[in-house]
Image (cartoon, rainbow, N blue to C red):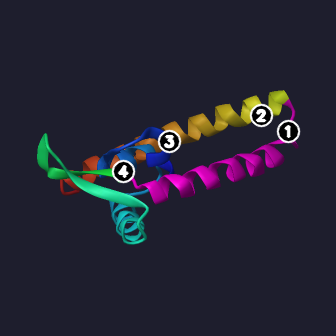
């Protein structure tokens, strides 16, 4: 839901690409969020095999309520760091995110090749 709120409507594979979640976890989350009325699935007119996910008005309301609270909690946590420490943390997290994406990409490639 957070990815759809931040980036807008997209395919489930795009959600996988933007998160640390695998396809199975995204699929389960989509099912739960759809059942709860937070997201919709519609057929992609350009490729009928794929679905486009989007927030419903209810999902948008929930997203808009949660994000400010999360940002406030994040700010409170980060308040214990000075500017150089925050910069170092940002750099380390970016490095870990890049490494995680590489590992995920490699595992997906291995799975597709039957390894």
User: Which one is in front in this view, the residue at disc 4 or the one at disc 1?
Assistant: 4
User: Which one is in front in this view, the residue at disc 2 or the one at disc 3?
Assistant: 3
Q: Could you tell me how far apart the alpha carbons at marks 2 and 1 are, in whole angstroms?
A: 6 Å
Residue 100 pos. (x, y %): 48, 45
Classed neighbour count for the residue bearing mark 2: other residues with Cα under 10 Å, few (<14), some (14–19), many (≥20): some
Name the residue carrying label 3.
6
Q: Mark 3 falls on what kind of element?
A: helix
| Disc on res. 86 | 2
Classed neighbour count for the residue bearing mark 1: other residues with Cα under 10 Å, few (<14), some (14–19), many (≥20): few
First in sequence: mark 4 vs mark 3: 3
Classed neighbour count for the residue bearing mark 4: other residues with Cα under 10 Å, few (<14), some (14–19), many (≥20): many
Question: Which residue appears at 66% of the width and 36% of the height?
Answer: 92
| Disc on res. 81 | 1
Q: Could you tell me how far apart the alpha carbons at marks 4 and 3 are, in whole angstroms?
A: 11 Å
Mark 4–mark 3 CB contact (< 8 Å): no
User: Which one is in front in this view, the residue at disc 2 or the one at disc 4?
Assistant: 4
Residue 71 pos. (x, y %): 70, 46
First in sequence: mark 2 vs mark 3: 3
Residue segment shown in magenta: 55-82
Front residue of 28 and 61 = 61
Q: Mark 1 falls on what kind of element?
A: loop
Q: Residue furthest front?
A: 57
Q: Is residue 107 left or right of residue 87?
A: left
Name the residue carrying label 4.
54
First in sequence: mark 2 vs mark 4: 4
| Disc on res. 51 | none
Q: Could you tell me how far apart the alpha carbons at marks 3 and 1 are, in whole angstroms?
A: 26 Å
Count the marks.
4
Mark 2–mark 1 CB contact (< 8 Å): yes
Front residue of 3 and 57 = 57
Q: Is residue 16 above or below residue 35?
A: above
Residue 36: say if magenta: no
């Amino acid at each position: 839901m957070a990815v759809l709120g931040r980036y807008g409507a997209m395919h489930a594979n795009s959600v996988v690409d933007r998160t640390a979640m695998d396809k199975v976890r995204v699929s389960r989350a989509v099912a739960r969020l759809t059942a709860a009325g937070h997201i919709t699935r519609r057929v992609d007119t350009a490729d009928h095999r794929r679905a486009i996910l989007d927030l419903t008005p209810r999902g948008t309301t929930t997203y808009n309520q949660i994000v400010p609270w999360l940002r406030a909690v994040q700010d409170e946590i980060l308040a214990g760091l000075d500017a150089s420490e925050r910069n170092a943390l940002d750099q380390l997290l970016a490095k870990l995110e890049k490494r995680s994406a590489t590992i995920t990409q490699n595992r997906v490639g291995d799975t597709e090749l039957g390894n």
